[in-house]
Image: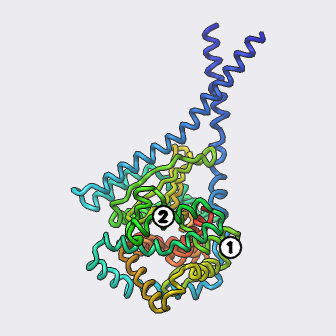
Amino acid sequence: MKKKIIVLGMAFFFMIVINAGICSDEKSYVENLIKEKTEQILSIIRKKDISQKEKKQKIFDIAKPLFDFTTMSKLTLGRKYWSELTSEQQKRFVDLFVKRLRMVYLDRVDIYGNETVSFKPAIQKRKNIIYVPSVITSKNEKFSVIYKFWKSPQGWKIYDVEVEGVSIVRTYRSQFLEIIKNKGIKGLFQELEKLTQQS
Amino acid sequence: MKKKRIVFFILLLAITTANVCAGSDNQNNVFWEEEIGPPEKVIVNDPLEPYNRAITEFNDKAYFYALKPVAKGYAKIVPETIRLSIDRCFKNLEFPIRFVNNVLQLKFKNAGIELTRFVINSSIGIAGFMDPAKKWFHLEPKKEDFGQTLGYYHMGSVFHIVWPFIGPSNLRDTIGKAGDIFTQPASYLLDWWILLAARAFEKINYTSLHIGEYESMKKAAVDYYIFIRDSYEQMRIKQIKE
């Protein structure tokens, strides 16, 4: 009987060890995921035989599945305003926000090109949140970029990116709140419609 | 009997897995408010907003109508490698600021690295035009200024303020900038107009290496004053933490 209990205890212990291993594997999984996608994107940026427009489309196709745009939108708007929207409005907002991000950040492809990226070990912030810090080196400068992942029902996705301590979600949030304060939520929609129609 | 044991093990695995990896589902709704802070919370104290907006507008015009065309013309005459060297040289001259403030923040190892960098780059690096300290010895610069030192000792930004030509700042960093002048030997040795001309040249040289960045940042913004203001304050908070 005693023997059985010891065996059982040991089995239990090993199971936990094995499982902890599985969980910490998530860290390296996320790390490898962003590494691999970054490599793909960099190789596209460095390609010389395709047009800028084609490049941007290809990069977007690679980057899109990495992001959780709905959560990003929720975070930027904040729970209070997000829950005030109808589900249709929420969808529209995510749409406009993605369009905006796409326009803005893909345009940087024109400026950058000779940068190198190196990744640091991922940090488990919480059970469902993993940060992957990286350093981008360009010409004379270095800047830090942190990809913030969370375990969404669809798997690990980015919900925010921090460049030199500046969070995309946070800067958009304060801009959106400023507009809501002055022109209301309708004004924000109008502003976004206007901005996404340009160019 | 054997079958029973296998079933038992699988069950055990399932239970422990649930235990160790649990917690992700019920936190779905909670995590985001904690992560970014409640929407009502204002990060930046900005009582001077109307003035700050006007100066930001002025700086924007100054960039597009003066600084950018000059920097572009300059970039056409001077090759990039030389401009990068000049940029390094200016940074090397700011060594006293970094050294003093590393010491003030009790970061003695970083102060040592800065001192070593200065000695190597001023000699082998030919007055700082090259950066052999980084290239050969892998010594990275440890940027600290007096504004960061004040932040290190828990001074807040107090309020945001935008300066003509210089750009976004706050009360803490303005005091910091003034303090930094005192740690620069050049401020005691040279006439004010030479210093001013040197600063202008530094700015033109720097801008020539960063054309397009301000434009893309402005384009990224919905309200570019808020965008610049918040980016600045967030960036400084990070620099102080480091």
Q: Position of residue B58 (x, y in %)?
A: 47, 88
Above-or-below relation of B77 to A85: below
Instruction: Sort mark 2 into few (<14), some (14-19) or many (20+) by Cα contacts within 10 Å.
Output: many
- Residue ID at (37%, 64%): A139
- Residue ID at (62%, 56%): B32
Residue pointed to by mark 2: B117
Kind of residue at disc 1: Gly
Q: Position of residue B181 (x, y in %)?
A: 56, 82
Kind of residue at disc 2: Arg
Instruction: Give the position of the C terminus of chain A as an image quadrant.
Output: bottom left
Q: Position of residue A128 (x, y in %)?
A: 60, 45
Which chain does tag 2 point to? B
Q: Secondary structure at mark 1?
A: loop
Residue pointed to by mark 1: B156
Instruction: Give the position of the N terminus of chain A as an image quadrant.
Output: top right
- Give the image quarter of residue A55: bottom left
> Do callouts 1 and 2 point to residues on the same chain?
yes
Q: Is residue B239 visible?
A: yes
Please state which of the two labelled residues, at mark 1 or mark 2, is closer to the viewer: 2
Label 2 near label 1: C-beta < 8 Å?
Answer: no
Above-or-below relation of A64 to B75: above
Q: How many circles with numbers are drawn on the protein?
A: 2
Which chain does tag 1 point to? B
- Residue ID at (38%, 72%): B210
- Residue ID at (49%, 88%): B190
Nearer to the camera, B110 or A193:
B110
Nearer to the camera, A197 or A111:
A111
